[in-house]
């Protein structure tokens, strides 16, 4: 059965997941995570993609990203990133073969009401996995930038995030408040189900042109 095409729209965010091949580790050392973030920043600049949230887990990565110009920028970014990081990782760890699963998963965030759910889903992933007690305890996520204003050129605030307040301090305070409670399990399940199927979160406007990524 052919796989469903990914729905890509300009200036519309996507929740992306890329997993290690056979659930194998993608990050072994601190230097691996640093290199991945360096290459992600490089690829997103080249492909005109904004990164709003991310988390690097041991064997997979979550991203919340928006193509600024061409929707295909997402596919171009993921291809370049996957190739460059796999080459680095194989050299670093003296291995051969594919590092990532052949196809990343993507779920279009079609309605604004799902946007902060995706932010929280991504940045709370280490907490759900039992790796840390609070998102701020985990070093490899965008939580430090979004909740505390830690400087990083990689993270670009989404306009809905910017609308949280008229100053950086106000935005960070309101963002922190989102994490005072856990993400409802029903919403976690919905995000997971739509991601597995490469389907959008929310209703896509009928007038929207669809596209497919490789």
Image (tube, rainbow, N blue to C red):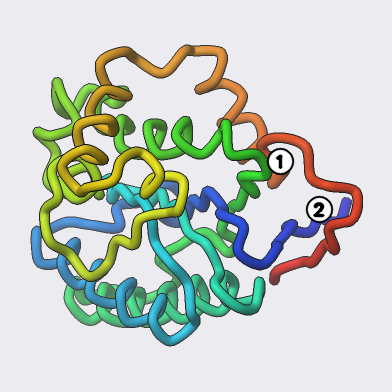
According to the picture, the residue beneath numbered tag 2 turns out to be 4
Q: Position of residue 195 (x, y in %)?
A: 61, 40
Viewer-nearest residue: 109 or 131: 109
Residue density around tag 2, few if under 14, some if 14–19, many if 20 or more, within 10 Å: few
Viewer-nearest residue: 34 or 2: 34
- Give the numbered dot on residue 197: 1
With 206 as the anchor, is 185 left or right in this view? left
The residue lying furthest to the bottom in this view is: 46
In this rendering, is residue 106 above or below 120? below
The quadrant holding residue 87 is: bottom left
Q: Secondary structure at mark 1?
A: loop
In this rendering, is residue 31 above or below 200? below
In this rendering, is residue 166 above or below 135? below
- Give the numbered dot on residue 209: none
Q: Residue at x 14, y 50 (%)?
A: 149
The quadrant holding residue 121 is: top left
Q: Are marks 1 and 2 in contact (CB under 8 Å)?
A: yes
Residue 19 appears in the picture as rendered: no
Q: Residue at x 31, y 40 (%)?
A: 165
Viewer-nearest residue: 30 or 16: 16
In this rendering, is residue 167 above or below 184? below
The quadrant holding residue 34 is: bottom left
């Amino acid at each position: 059965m052919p796989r469903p095409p990914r729905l890509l729209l300009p200036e519309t965010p996507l929740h992306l997941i890329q997993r290690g091949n056979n659930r194998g580790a993608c990050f072994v050392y601190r230097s691996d995570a640093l290199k991945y973030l360096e290459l992600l920043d490089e690829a997103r600049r080249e492909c005109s993609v904004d990164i709003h949230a991310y988390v690097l887990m041991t064997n997979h990565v979550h991203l919340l990203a928006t193509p600024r110009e061409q929707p295909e920028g997402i596919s171009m970014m993921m291809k370049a990133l996957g190739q460059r990081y796999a080459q680095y990782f194989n050299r670093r760890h003296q291995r051969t073969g594919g590092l990532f699963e052949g196809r990343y998963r993507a779920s279009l965030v079609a309605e604004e009401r799902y946007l902060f759910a995706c932010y929280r889903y991504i940045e709370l992933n280490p907490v759900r996995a039992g790796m840390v007690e609070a998102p701020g305890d985990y070093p490899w996520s965008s939580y430090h930038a979004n909740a505390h204003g830690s400087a990083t050129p990689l993270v670009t605030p989404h306009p809905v995030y910017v609308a949280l307040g008229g100053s950086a301090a106000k935005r960070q305070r309101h963002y922190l408040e989102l994490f005072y409670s856990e993400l409802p399990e029903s919403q976690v399940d919905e995000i997971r189900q739509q991601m597995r199927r490469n389907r959008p979160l929310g209703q896509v406007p009928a007038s929207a042109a669809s596209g497919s990524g490789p």
